[in-house]
Image (spheres, grey):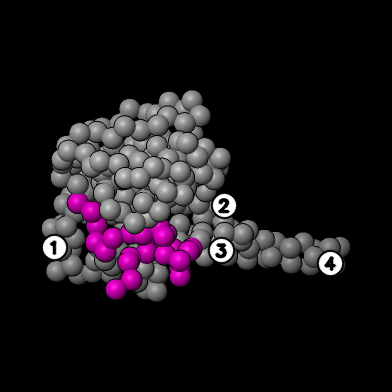
Amino acid sequence: MKYWALVTAFGLAIGQTAALAIDASYPNDMELRVLPRFCFWKLRGGKAEFEQGFALLGEQFKNSHHYCAGLNFLNRYYRAPASPEAKSVLHFAINEFTYMVEHLVPNSSLAAESYLGRATAYALSRRDGEAMRDFQTAVRYNPRLAGAYVAWADFLVERKLREDALKVVTEGLRWNPGHRALENRYTTLGGKLPYPEPVAASGSPALPDSGGKAPEPAPAASTQSVEPEPKATTTDPDRPYCRFCPDQP
């Protein structure tokens, strides 16, 4: 009996250790270095940094730590996508971005980015219908968020939907002329030169509806959207795991 009690206790201890290995904490100091600068202001800053945060993001700065945490969980996933904890990390990311999209202030400067983050986490979790809806919503909030078209097109290519991917990239170039990553994907997917004509200053993007998935109703693009600095990138060959890291100087 004592032997089996010891074995059982040992097994429980291993299970508890494994559970603790899933890091559900908010970004540490090292992780903050590759997140948008307002994340440092929100999580480590004082009065002066908070004033900067409100000046940049408005009232959305109050809960921007959820957005920062969502990005950080994605980064943790990319650093170890084959780890036993990867699925849980994506779940944490979805929860953080969901909080953001459910608590967006009017004309939120983080609306498009929050939907893009959740779309990415959904896509990595193979929740394709939800990913499609969030990609669509992201670019409807901000048609000039080039990274959303890049991520959406890559998602469609991985699902063998190259024609729809080309439609997404084409629309992305209309709103973001000269964007290198979009131009590269346009030619790779068979797009014909010259590149698509840019759109007027206002309007809504024409979006594909792949796989028969009906998008959820989405708001019109905000005229007051502010893209956080430094800009996020999804195409850094030196840091492929870090799709939301700031551009290198």
- Between the C-alphas of marks 1 and 3, the distance is 36 Å
Q: Residues within 10 Å of mark 1 (few under 14, many from 20)?
A: some
Q: Which residue is labeled 2 in the image?
A: 87
Three-letter code, disc 4: Lys
Pick whichever of labels 3 and 2 is earlier in the sequence: 3
Tell me if 175 is positioned left or right of 187 in this view: left
- Please report contact status of discs 4 and 2: CB closer than 8 Å, yes or no: no
Query: Circle 3 sits on which residue?
Result: 80
Numbered disc in front, either 4 or 2: 2
- Residue 226 percent coordinates (x, y): 19, 51
Q: Position of residue 137 (x, y in %)?
A: 33, 37
Residue 151 visible in the current orientation: no
**Dot 2 lies on which element?**
helix
Instruction: Indicate which label's residue lies in the foreground, 4 or 3.
Output: 3
Q: Name the residue type under label 1.
A: Glu
Callout in the foreground (4, 1): 1
Marking on residue 2: 4
Q: Residue 120's x, y, as percent?
A: 44, 48
Q: Nearer the viewer, mark 1 or mark 2?
A: 2
Locate residue 52 relative to residue 241 in the image: left or right. left
Task: Measure the alpha-carbon separation of dots 4 and 3.
Answer: 39 Å
Total residue callouts: 4
Q: Which mark is residue 92?
A: none
Viewer-proximal residue, 199 or 13?
199
Looking at the image, is mark 1 or mark 2 earlier in the sequence?
A: 1
10 Å crowding of disc 4: few (<14), some (14-19), many (20+): few
Residue visible at 32% across and 66% down in the picture = 247
